[in-house]
Image (cartoon, rainbow, N blue to C red):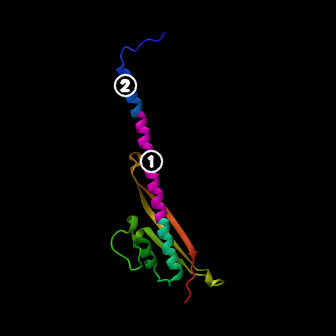
Amino acid sequence: MRQKNPNPDSRRGQALVESALVLIVVITTIIAIMDFSQLLFTHQMLVERARMGLRWGMINKWDGTGDQIANLVIYGRTSGGTGPGVLGLTRANVRVVYTPGTVDNPNDARITVSIVDYDYRFFTPFIAGKFRNNFAVVESSPYIYLD
């Protein structure tokens, strides 16, 4: 025979503790999903910026420094701008390398656009702060500019 619980408030207290424990796990999971989503969005945006600069650099005359390509990646225009660009990018974060063709094959020239030393920022309290990615994005393509 089942005994009646002498204190009915103890069950409400148990439910409150269980709900608090489950709520901690749920909120932590939601914050982790938001953090991961932001990381993916940021990385995809950096990839698209590097590709945009590379596409422009492939078909336009090399300026000797790569500043026009870097400005396109950072500010969205070749003329440049002031201050940090999209997602906090600076000129120090964008590396543009032109590799001329060889004697045997002068048409083998390449342009490489890299986003380096980029600081990803996290929201999650456990890993709050930033993570530096030494080579966040590296894109390379043959240089096809024709005079």
* Residue at horizontal 50 percent and vertical 78 percent from the top: 56
* Most foreground residue, 139 or 7: 7
Task: Decide if residue 83 is in sight here.
Answer: yes
- Please give the name of the residue rendered at 41% of the width and 71% of the height, measured from the top-left corner: 74
Q: Earlier in the sequence, mark 1 or mark 2?
A: 2
Which residue is at a point 33% across and 73% down the rendered structure image? Answer: 82
- Asked whether 121 or 13 is in front, the reply is 13
State the SS at label 2: helix
Which residue is denoted by mark 1 in the rendering?
32
Taking the image as shown, residue 71 lies to the left or right of residue 60, namely left
Measured from the top left, where is residue 78 in percent x and y? 42, 79
Which quarter shows the C terminus?
bottom right
Amino acid type, label 1: Ala
In front: 84, or 29? Answer: 29
Q: Which residues are magenta?
A: 21-45
Q: Amino acid at mark 2?
A: Arg
Tell me where residue 22 sits by quadrant: top left
Looking at the image, residue 28 lies above or below residue 142: above
The residue positioned 65% from the left and 83% from the top of the image is: 105
> Depth-wise, is mark 1 or mark 2 nearer the camera?
2
In this view, which residue lies farthest toward the top? 1
Classify residue 108 as left or right of residue 25: right
Is residue 107 located in the magenta-colored stretch of the structure?
Answer: no
